Image (spheres, rainbow, N blue to C red):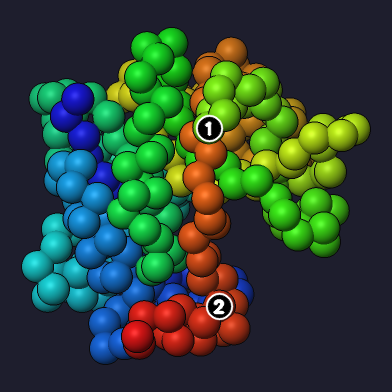
Amino acid sequence: MSTLILIPARMASTRLPGKPLADIAGKPMIVHVAARAAEADLGRVAVATDTEAVADAVRAFGFEAVMTRPDHQSGSDRIFEALGTFDPKGEIETIVNVQGDLPTVEPAIIRAALKPFEDRAVDIATLGVEIVRQEEKTNPNVVKIVGSPLSETRLRALYFTRATAPWGEGPLYHHVGLYAYRRAALERFVALKQSVLERRESLEQLRALEAGMRIDAEIVRSVPLGVDTPEDLERAREILSH
């Protein structure tokens, strides 16, 4: 499969404004993400942004960047516009959406997101991690995958929720918001209107499930550190300084 990794990045974060350019060990955070994505060795890597300063920083370190409109409501909308710029002839088959606030993400985790595409019936692939900390099972900020097990390392997603689910004995899985799309699935997804459950749970992926699209999740061992707060940023600095 021909694969393109796209990293959406915007400056208007409410909790940590300007975070794509936050310095971590001498480089902007977005550059660390691009470097990790390149190390996954899946294909071309580019940052999709609405800010010239982010594009300039990315290019200064030898990576590609593309400018996108500032009014996108989600990262999937931004990467779809970027896809049209990079590949107007439709030659790219698979698009991986790596969030721009994952500076410590392991390349192996990015590669794992493509494994569910071994099944041609899968439209969208994503990642999950078994929850081991009790407090995370009831934390609404920890999104859970309710899924049907296909193997020891894969679920077919039936629902995503901020609630503690499913009920009863058995593991719970934390959803890691890193996605891979078949091109046709991304085109279909961004053309859909917001769904009822998407709005209720504030989870974009429910739009795909409500439309009958199939999402499978590969289970990995660890959740990559997402930088959303000043405390997260300091943790990333501590990790990457070594």
Q: Position of residue 106 (x, y in %)?
A: 36, 58
Query: Within the image, what quadrant is residue 164 found in?
Result: top right
Q: Is residue 232 above or below residue 132?
A: below
Q: Residue at x 21, y 34 (%)?
A: 3
Q: Residue at x 13, y 73 (%)?
A: 61
Q: Is residue 208 left or right of residue 22?
A: right
Q: What residue would you read off at disc 2?
A: 232
Q: Is residue 225 left or right of residue 133?
A: left
Relative depth, front residue between 168 and 165: 168
Q: Amino acid at mark 2?
A: Asp
Query: Within the image, what quadrant is residue 209 found in?
Result: top right
Categorize mark 2 by other alpha carbons within 10 Å: few (<14), some (14-19), many (20+). Answer: some
Q: Residue at x 30, y 79 (%)?
A: 28
Relative depth, front residue between 27 and 114: 114
Q: Residue at x 51, y 66 (%)?
A: 225
The C terminus - image quarter: bottom left
Q: Position of residue 202 (x, y in %)?
A: 69, 44
Q: Which mark is residue 153?
A: 1
